Image: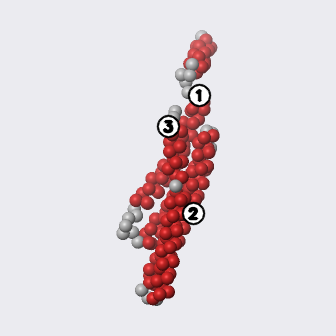
Amino acid sequence: MKRLAARAFLATAVLVSGLGLLPSCSVVKKSMDCRALSKAVNPHMRALRATSRSLGPTSTPAQVGAAYAQMANDVTASAAAVAALDLGTPELADLSQRYQAMCASSATAFRGMTKATEALTKAQQVAGQHGEDAKAALEQASALVRAATAEVQRASEPETSILQQINALCGSD
């Protein structure tokens, strides 16, 4: 009797699956991959945004440098968390690779901003003491900060597109 019930259940499952009423294995795997990717990315993105929001018009170059150093750590940790995933959905695996590359570029740019703000802080400290040499150093450090700002913007540019593509793919179940 148990065998007959098991066979009936199996036949029903095959029939329902064949009619498309049960999700396929690829849909289930994609859903699992999406959840794993979300769990890997979201905590780091929240930390990154919180650090970014802590900066304001009255932030000193030292505070900006410290925040960018923290943001470099956040995106590095996010990339490492994503790299540790075993994503079986090809589209997500590709987006994961692109996300990791964007994180690496952003971390480099964030560290560049940290160095530029450190140079600006040093130049500001000596500006009043050494006349024209200090003024030239201050202008040079300011130029470094402008260049670093442009690099941060360039490196972070793909983020929105990559995250939108991940959200679109994961929301299409």
The reply to whether dot 3 and dot 1 touch (C-beta < 8 Å) is: no
Badge 2 marks a residue whose secondary structure is helix
Question: Which residue is painted at 38% across and 65% down in the image?
Answer: 56
How much space separates mark 3 and mark 1, taking CA atoms?
Answer: 16 Å
- Characterize the local packing of mark 2: few (<14), some (14-19) or many (20 or more) Cα atoms within 10 angstroms: some
Q: Which mark is in front, 2 or 1?
A: 2
Please state if 60 lies on the left or on the right of 7 as rendered. Answer: left
> Picture coordinates of residue 82 (x, y %)?
57, 49
Q: Amino acid at mark 2?
A: Thr
Q: On residue 108, which mark appears?
A: 2
Badge 3 marks a residue whose secondary structure is loop
Return the residue at label 1.
24
Residue 114 visible in the shown view: no
Query: Earlier along the polypeptide chain: callout 3 or callout 1?
Result: 1
The reply to whether dot 2 and dot 3 touch (C-beta < 8 Å) is: no
Residue 73 position (above or below residue 23): below
> Picture coordinates of residue 64 (x, y %)?
44, 68
Query: Earlier along the polypeptide chain: callout 2 or callout 1?
Result: 1
Please state if 67 lies on the left or on the right of 26 as rendered. Answer: left
Q: Amino acid at mark 3?
A: Gly
How much space separates mark 2 and mark 1, taking CA atoms?
Answer: 41 Å
Q: Quadrant of residue 24?
A: top right
Return the residue at label 3.
171
Q: Amino acid at mark 1?
A: Ser
Q: Which mark is in front, 3 or 1?
A: 3
Q: Quadrant of residue 124?
A: bottom left
> Picture coordinates of residue 83 (x, y %)?
61, 50
- Characterize the local packing of mark 1: few (<14), some (14-19) or many (20 or more) Cα atoms within 10 angstroms: few
Question: Which residue is painted at 53% across and 59% down in the image?
Answer: 154
Query: Earlier along the polypeptide chain: callout 2 or callout 3?
Result: 2
